[in-house]
Image (tube, grey):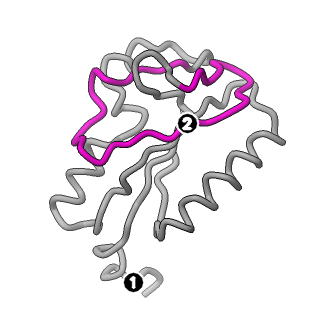
Amino acid sequence: TLFPYTTLFRSIIALVTSGGIVPIGNPDRIQSASAQKWGKYDISSKSELGSDYFTIHGGYDPVYANEKPDRVAPLDIMKQYEGEGYIGKVYDYFYATTGTGTSVGNSIKFGEEIGAELKAAGVDGVILTST
């Protein structure tokens, strides 16, 4: 087969988004457009993002994302898959930035930085969401 499913059942999967989902208050002050940085947030004790998170993204209508941040960064579904045994574990940290107007150079830099952290942590795969 093309994909060894038994490996997936043991895999650590991380959640990363350019949809601007951050903790309430935007503690890292990530820009809503032309992002200069990204944030890393502990989700180890969460089963969903819920009302503790919102979007700071300047490129789309935030109503539905703010109503349920898991629509953009689906921690709720990932935790469900973990509980049902479809994946081994959701990685303890979630990464976020915004994509609107963010330069290609910064996008590459963010990807390399986040990727290096995930590789060092032994993460096997990433769900990367956007808007």
Coordinates of residue 51 in the picture (x, y in percent)? 28, 21
- Badge 1 marks a residue whose secondary structure is loop
Write the residue at 36% across / 27% down.
69
The type of residue carrying mark 1 is: Pro
Span shown in magenta: 28-56
- Disc 2 designates what residue? 39
- Disc 1 designates what residue? 4
Marked residue nearer the N-terminal end (2 or 1) = 1
* The C terminus, quarter of image: top right
Mark 2 crowdedness (10 Å alpha carbons): few <14, some 14-19, many ≥20 = many
Q: Quadrant of residue 4?
A: bottom left
Tell me the tag on residue 72.
none
- Badge 2 marks a residue whose secondary structure is strand
Q: Marks 2 and 1, Cα distance to the nearest angstrom?
A: 32 Å
Q: Main secondary structure of the magenta part?
A: loop
Which residue sits furthest bottom? 1
Q: Is residue 62 left or right of residue 119?
A: left
Coordinates of residue 75 in the picture (x, y in percent)? 32, 43
